[in-house]
Image: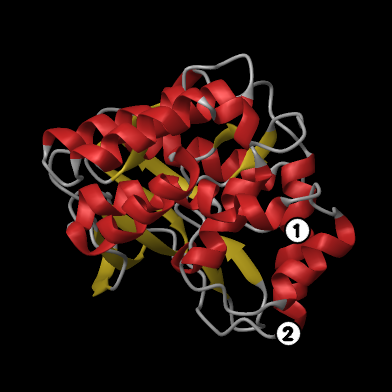
Amino acid sequence: MSLLPGAREVRPVGGGDINESFRVVLGDGREAFVKTRAEVPAGEYAAEAEGLRWLAEPGALRTPEVLAVDKAYLALEWIEPGRLDAAGAEELGRGLAETHAAGAPCFGKEGLGATSGFGWLRLSNEPAEDWARFYAERRLAPLTRMCAERALLSASAVAALERLCERMPALLGPAEPPARLHGDLWSGNVMADREGRPWLIDPAAYGGHREVDLAMLRLFGASSQRIFAAYEEHSPLAEGWQDRVELCQLLPLLVHSLLFGDSYVGSVQRIAKRFGG
């Protein structure tokens, strides 16, 4: 691979819908997972590298070591894939609880993490004074506007989402300090190594509410209920969290509506009607 001097034994591997991914032997003999694509937004790979390091900081969960980062590629420690076992699922639940509890300076993120990227879709991480404002103004409102511009949602659904954003403080549970979020926590962004242990990959990290990470993991295929049981045992969620799961799932559902088409729109419209009237 010409992007990495001295790289050899370059083999394409599966790595998601957006990037091209390779298993590479570097010049010093280490194996690496390398992702790249044409026309990467400025700072995207640097922000991902920063997010991986930030999530690893508390020492509760593993993330791949960043071996090299450039505007055109990201090279990470190669993790030989396996399958998450029961002990790994419990470790993931406890580790998420500890990572969330490590906290963040604010709701949002400054510096390299000034935006969160989901493919071509960029969302502002400009800090807000509380979670209700951040979730409404930095996440749901701009996604609603983008969906409306692409005629993905009915006029009634757009109006319901706008009312939902206005009512956000009343819809959320008790106030909590900012949690250290992965930000794109679906099952594909939790990998297991050969020993069945969990690793976090592909973050869109920022400071937010912990229920968002958990709601996304529930939406897109958590491998085991042991994850949530272990989380609850370590850090119980606030009363009424079950009623807020779909409210938190609006974020990934709107993102997926924009990225992958209208197969997700029905769920968005149903949840919008439930919470926005």
Residue at image point 43% right, 45% down: 251
Q: Is residue 43 above or below residue 180?
A: above
Is residue 128 positioned above or below 266 on the image? above
Q: Which of the labelled discs sits on residue 20, or is there none?
A: none
Q: Quadrant of residue 270?
A: bottom left
Secondary structure, mark 2, is helix
How crowded is the residue under tag 2: few (<14 C-alpha within 10 Å), some, or many (20+)?
some
Q: Amino acid at mark 1?
A: Gly
Q: Picture coordinates of residue 71 (x, y %)?
A: 27, 34
Question: Which residue sits at x=21%, y=41%?
Answer: 120
Q: Nearer the viewer, residue 87 or 133?
A: 133
Q: Name the spot of residue 57 as percent of width and height, x first.
A: 71, 41
- Disc 1: CA contacts within 10 A as few (<14), some (14-19) or many (>=20): many
Compared with 52, 199 (above or below) is below
Label 1: state its secondary structure. helix
Q: Quadrant of the N terminus?
A: bottom left
- Give the residue pinned by disc 1: 95
Residue at 53% across, 27% down? 167
Q: Horizontally, is 58 left or right of 17 in the view? A: right
Q: Position of residue 146 (x, y in %)?
A: 21, 34
Q: Amino acid at mark 2?
A: Ala
Sequence-first tag of 2 and 1: 2
**Residue at which label 2 appears:** 86
